[in-house]
Image (cartoon, grey):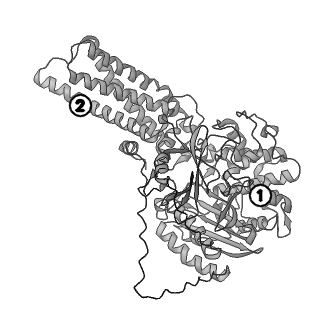
Amino acid sequence: MKKPLIALLATLLVAATQVTPPPVAPPAAPAAHAAPAPTVPAPTPQLTEADVGAWLDGYMPAALKAGKIAGAQVAIVKDGAVLFEKGYGYADVAAKTPMDPRRSLMRIGSTSKLLTWTAVMQLVEAGRIDLNADVNRYLDFRITPPGRPVTINDLMQHRGGFEEGLKDLLASDPKLLKTTERYLKENTRPFLFAPGEAPAYSNYGVALAGYIVQRVSGEPFEAYVARHITGPLGMAHTSFAQPLPPQLAPLAAKGYATSDGPAQPYELVGTAPAGSVATTADDMARFMLMQLGGGSYGGATILKPATTALLHQPSTPPVPGFDTMAHGFFWMTRNGTPVIGHGGDTIVFHTDLNLLPEKKVGIFVSFSSRGENDAVYGVRERLFDLFMDRYFPASPVPMQPAIASAAQDAQALAGHYESTRRVETGFISLFYLLQQDQVTANPDGTIGVSSIEGKRFREVAKGLWREVDGNRLLRVTELGGRRAIVDSQNPVGVLQAVPFSRNSTVFQSILGLSLLVLVLAVLMWPVGWWIRRRFGAPPAATGRAASARLLVRVGAIADLAYLAGWYAILAPILGQHVDAYNATLDTPIRLLQIAAIVPVAAAGVGVWNLVEMFRQPFGWGMRVRAALVALALLGILWVAAVAHLIGWSLNY
């Protein structure tokens, strides 16, 4: 259900806030004369089928119920075999169909990318793709980045420099789904950065890689993966195809916003190589075993051991010791153990796959609901954290004291930041303007980051901030001439300090005050007219001044209608209905782009009206009101310009 217009006013008038957890109380002092109890480390449970089954049976049902998540699947592999797999909840809530880890197909979103990168590495192994070659060598259209060419390696590490894109990314109607080739050619993304300059997660870049597989192999991408990866591995319930093949379609688990809500339409992904896989936990167990087995499983060799090692090999991290990208896998350390993996999210399905190569262990989990208040993100993250803490615990990390300048540095660091994964050149940039990160300086000299909820960071070396009671790190650096923050657990995005013109607080303040003035003015004008008519007062203005006053009223009303139109276009994002962004919106968007003359003309008549107020002997009350309205109309024009509502492109 769409939110009423008043929701827009509330959204735009309220600035982002950072919730900082209360200080942790110090431990109670031991009782007087009490002998200290010896500390004996609790034994680490063994990763066995019985233990992990009991643990998951305790965690998953309770987590699904509390979060209103309809269903989930889990698979765990160890030492070349499936250790555990199970479904929880329902594949179809209304029909009470249990979730089956062998037959219920889940959408795994961006975890699909791992199959795409495996396909790329097969062609690298065959000498048909060069990871360091210009991607234009393999394309039948050209990409023209600033600086050096984009390489396959850049795509694998999300360093192609592409701006984020939304149009045609998701659809619920197969008639609106584009082929990957058509998507790439019709939805080319602008460059925010030169290739290799900065990490910026890009579905477009991965779709390019999938299209290159298709071009080089001479096979449709979906058919290539089926023939060379999923087929040999016996992954009979896995497919990139959209819609699903007839034999698999009846097995698809239904997705839900919450378990007590209706089933959502089957999500069709425009960037298919980046996220269209439907699969089961059992099939993904086979994929994990192949990756952990040096490229082979069940008699099938998908990659040679050396190629598999290259696929898993980490690139040089942005900061020594920080997480980084391998060749498509996220490479990280958790509790001191190297981990490679990839998460995945559609609107309703949410997945995570993690491999511990040194331990020959892998864990896959997929959920079929976003859950109440987006509960699935916390449930998913906590599941892997608990898994690691239970079976591969970390050694205690000594607390590092803060440096002397920490409080002063925290104040200097506070402010608004934007991710390198963003839109800057189209009207969708308005959404990113309203979703900026905020770094907050806490009274104790620590900082908080709004996108890293519940964490505080203490400066332990100049420009290096460590999580209080944790291992996460933030490094302050520079990118593109702006202060930047690198997160040790995010190798595909960097936070950049925003310039004044795009500061979310400034933007929301100007928009909110402008809206307030215009709404009050529009409401007061008929009141003034009624009072003058009731008491027989003469018109407030005549001649040119009267014309200016009339036009400024028309301009104010037109501005409000103009913003309401853009709200109607942007509302699906607030409701997470991004499948609305396709060619069906081209006509209303084009009409709003034509209507960009409205804020320009309204600002002009606002200034004209103010000039007329000073040319004739009006009172200061009328002049002040005219000045406020003129400033409000200029404010709306500024907002339209900064948010790129003034433009002509239908590629967003």
Which is nearer the eye, 386 or 369?
386
Q: Which amino acid type is marked by label 1?
A: Gln
Q: Secondary structure at mark 1?
A: loop
The residue shown at (45%, 41%) is: 504
**Which is more foreground, mark 2 or mark 1?**
1
The quarter of the image holding the C terminus is top right
Q: Secondary structure at mark 2?
A: helix
Residue 313 has which mark?
1
Residue 16 x, y percent position in the rendering: 43, 48
Residue 166 x, y percent position in the rendering: 58, 43
- Above-or-below relation of 446 to 180: below
The residue shown at (63%, 57%) is: 344
- Above-or-below relation of 382 to 578: below
**In which image quadrant can residue 109 be found?**
bottom right
Q: Is residue 237 left or right of residue 474?
A: right
**In which image quadrant can residue 523 be found?**
top left
Which is nearer the eye, 124 or 146?
146
The residue shown at (77%, 57%) is: 313
Q: Which amino acid type is marked by label 2?
A: Met
- Above-or-below relation of 200 to 192: below
Q: Is residue 576 left or right of residue 149?
A: left
Which residue does the numbered mark 2 point to in the structure image? 524
Q: Residues within 10 Å of mark 1 (few under 14, many from 20)?
A: some
Residue 138 x, y percent position in the rendering: 81, 40
Mark 2 and mark 1 lie on one chain; the one further toward the N terminus is 1
Q: Is residue 406 left or right of residue 245?
A: left
Residue 154 x, y percent position in the rendering: 73, 45
